[in-house]
């Protein structure tokens, strides 16, 4: 019996290596095309800033495309999480072109959004198509979804280790075995090197000065982690709030991003808040060198939560980087620590709190900034994780473990005191 099991395992190795290669190359190539296209539309908007006034019409186009063709995939990342927990049917491939087009339109006209959600959805949709080709069962489909998330995340940010762990951690290692772990890392590197092959450049950040960990720097790191957790909580609640408000008040879905686009266009072009449109990568880079206004992170929360809540497409992670870096950089005025370290800790800590993934975020911080600030990053990400509430940016994410027990205990105690 044992030999039969070993034989099955050996026979499955070539199959899964091929699946990882296909998923990594296809998802990585899709991400490479997406990143090139995103850079083009961003530069076009920067050099033709009048186009922001057309944001309502871009929103209407995105709304129409999902209303008539994308009803089955409108949940986005939440659909991936739901199919992992309770597999029902293969994710339609149309998720990939719809989210790609929707995100490019959002950024072309100036919506405040990210890119991770797009890459993850493309990766998940591409990977799940292999279910039919290789005739996989539900247990194997779960592995495919992990591979799609891993490949999408690793390729779009250039962080293969964090991408592999993020795919596992966002599912809280549920129904995950050793094979899933090995394959997640394999596909992450396949996708990462595919993007490298296409000569796509990722943004580089630096934390040149790292102080010693002592009682004072530990204290400031914990406070920054707490503030990052609260910022993540505010961002998650803001996105859900605007989505609920617009779905309740505007019954015809395509009109939601149209009306929202009018408000955003007036705010960006009319009142001069254009630095909060799009990804905001130049602002993020600048936060590592120059202090910014204390309220900038709040404005990014407002504009991104509103953009995504009303129905525009894109990810949440890069705006979370913006929020965290802006928050950390602003603390340079009162925290006696290097500004790059403060911005770097906020960069990943807010992300950790919003996605409930402190391990992946710690790894990502070390991939982006180096090993030296690793202990500060780990502390900030952990504190932000525990202080960001029980609901993150993904409504369908299953939150378990110590954080889940902590909030369940808090709720129970609160109920007993009523």
Image (tube, grey):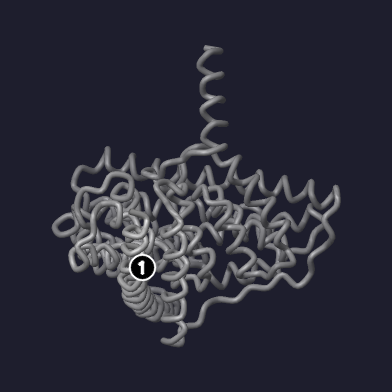
**Which residue is located at x 45 percent, y 51 percent?**
170
Residue 272 visible in this rendered orientation of the protein = no
Q: Nearer the viewer, residue 195 or 171?
A: 171
Q: Quadrant of residue 229?
A: top right
**Which residue is located at x 57 percent, y 47 percent?**
231
Please state if 246 lies on the left or on the right of 36 as rendered: left
Please state if 112 lies on the left or on the right of 414 as rendered: left
Q: Quadrant of residue 69?
A: bottom left
Residue 215: x %, y % from top left: 85, 48
Mark 1 neighbour class, 10 Å CA radius: few under 14, some 14 to 19, many 20 or more = few
**Which residue is located at x 51 percent, y 52 percent?**
301
Q: Nearer the viewer, residue 21 or 305?
A: 21
**Which residue is located at x 33 percent, y 73 percent?**
14
Please state if 99 lies on the left or on the right of 404 as rendered: left
The correct choice, above or below, for 344 with respect to 214 in the image is: below
Per the image, label 1 sits on a secondary structure element best described as helix
Mark 1 = which residue? 10
Residue 129 visible in this rendered orientation of the protein = yes
The correct choice, above or below, for 56 with respect to 248 in the image is: below
């Amino acid at each position: 019996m044992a030999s039969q099991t070993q034989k099955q395992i050996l026979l499955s190795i070539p199959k899964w290596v091929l699946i990882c290669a296909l998923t990594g190359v296809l998802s990585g190539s899709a991400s490479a095309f997406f990143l090139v296209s995103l850079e083009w539309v961003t530069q076009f908007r920067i050099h033709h800033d009048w186009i922001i006034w057309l944001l309502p019409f871009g929103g209407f186009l995105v709304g129409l495309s999902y209303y008539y063709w994308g009803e089955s995939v409108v949940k986005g990342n939440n659909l991936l999480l739901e199919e992992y927990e309770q597999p029902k049917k293969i994710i339609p491939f149309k998720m990939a072109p719809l989210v790609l087009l929707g995100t490019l339109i959002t950024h072309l006209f100036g919506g405040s959004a990210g890119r991770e959600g797009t890459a993850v959805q493309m990766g998940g949709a591409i990977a799940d198509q292999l279910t039919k080709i290789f005739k996989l069962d539900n247990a194997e489909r779960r592995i495919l979804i992990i591979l799609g998330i891993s490949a999408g995340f690793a390729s779009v940010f250039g962080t293969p280790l964090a991408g592999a762990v993020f795919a596992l951690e966002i599912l809280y290692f549920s129904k995950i075995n050793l094979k899933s772990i090995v394959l997640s890392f394999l596909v992450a590197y396949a996708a990462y090197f595919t993007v490298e092959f296409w000569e796509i450049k990722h943004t580089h950040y630096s934390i040149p000065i790292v102080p010693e960990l002592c009682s004072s720097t530990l204290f400031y790191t914990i406070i920054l982690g707490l503030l990052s957790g609260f910022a993540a909580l505010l961002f998650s609640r803001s996105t859900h709030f605007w989505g609920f408000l617009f779905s309740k008040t505007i019954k015809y879905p395509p009109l939601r991003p149209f009306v929202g686009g009018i408000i955003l266009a007036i705010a960006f072009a009319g009142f001069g808040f254009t630095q909060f449109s799009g990804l905001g990568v130049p602002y993020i880079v600048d936060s590592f060198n120059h202090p910014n206004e204390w309220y900038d992170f709040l404005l990014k929360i407002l504009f991104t939560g509103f953009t995504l809540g009303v129905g525009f497409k894109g990810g949440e992670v890069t705006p979370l980087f913006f929020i965290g870096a802006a928050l950390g950089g602003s603390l340079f005025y009162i925290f006696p620590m290097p500004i790059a370290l403060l911005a770097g800790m906020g960069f990943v800590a807010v992300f950790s709190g919003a996605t409930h993934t402190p391990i992946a975020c710690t790894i990502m911080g070390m991939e982006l900034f180096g090993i030296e600030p690793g202990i500060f990053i780990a502390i900030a990400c952990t504190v932000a994780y525990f202080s960001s509430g029980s609901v993150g940016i993904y409504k369908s994410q299953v939150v378990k473990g110590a954080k889940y027990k902590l909030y369940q205990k808090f709720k129970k105690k609160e109920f007993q005191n009523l």
